[in-house]
Image (cartoon, rainbow, N blue to C red):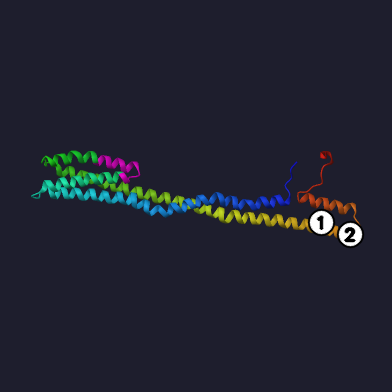
Amino acid sequence: MTRLTIITKIRFLAAIAPVVLSIASPILIAGFYLFGVMPVMLRENQVHAMQAADGLESALYQMDWGKTQPDGMEIVRGQQRRFVTLVDSVRAHATTPDQLEKLNQIARTANPIFEAMRKGEGEDVEPRLRELLGMIADLNAANEAAIDAATARAQSRSRMFIAIAVIAGILVPWAGFVMVYRIGSQAEGELKAIRGRLERMTESGATAEDLGEIDKALAELGFPKPNPMLAE
């Protein structure tokens, strides 16, 4: 039967902290990397999507203004091309289903309006443009909600990484230290008792009581007397 000696216990406890740190370190490294690139991710996705959505609104105003100018059709066509490009840009940077749903609704609504403007059928364009501006406002709200969601995810992950750092870097090492200290104190007491018995045995000879106390101390340290029934 395998017994845990005092040395085995100390070795086991000494290995806990490095093992936990080895597991936690890749997680923490990934977390630090994530927070390092978070501003870039927000810039490349949500901020860019919001800027493109603002461009959609600007393009509609330019169309509305341009159709009253002498070269109005050229202005309208140019802004329509810009509008389509911005729709594609928002779609490329959208990260939530709500953003994509609002964007698809804008695209479906804009196509017939633009077709009517190109054909000069402008009687009911004004109210339809206002409707489209309202959809763009809804898209901006969806973009802001996406930023809020990304921020909430970052905060949640930061709390998780803080907890991992506290457990792996503080609680586990200190808990291991306390346990090793207690086991070491126990071993120190038992070894001192054995040393005292040996000194008395040297002075006055060994007695059955002395040998029994030494056996008891060794058993406490994980080295009990072998069982004669298990001897080969």
Mostly what secondary structure, the magenta segment? helix
Placement of the C terminus among the 4 image quadrants: top right
The percent coordinates of residue 140 (x first, y second) are: 29, 48
The percent coordinates of residue 25 (x first, y second) are: 53, 52
Dot 1 alpha-carbon crowd within 10 angstroms: few under 14, some 14 to 19, many 20 or more: many
Q: Residue at x 27, y 49 (%)?
A: 52
> Which residue occupies the foreground of this view, 97 or 21?
21
Q: Residue at x 64, y 54 (%)?
A: 176
Circle 1 residue: 194
Which label was assigned to residue 228? none
Circle 2 residue: 202
Confirm whether the magenta stretch covers residue 221: no
Residue with the most extreme left position: 70
Q: Secondary structure at mark 2?
A: helix
Q: Residue at x 38, y 54 (%)?
A: 39
Stretch of the chain drawn in magenta: 92-106
User: Which three-letter amino acid code belongs to the residue tagged 2?
Assistant: Thr
Confirm whether the magenta stretch covers residue 96: yes
Q: Are marks 2 and 1 in contact (CB under 8 Å)?
A: no
Horizontal placement of 191 versus 200: left or right?
left
> Which residue occupies the foreground of this view, 53 or 3?
3
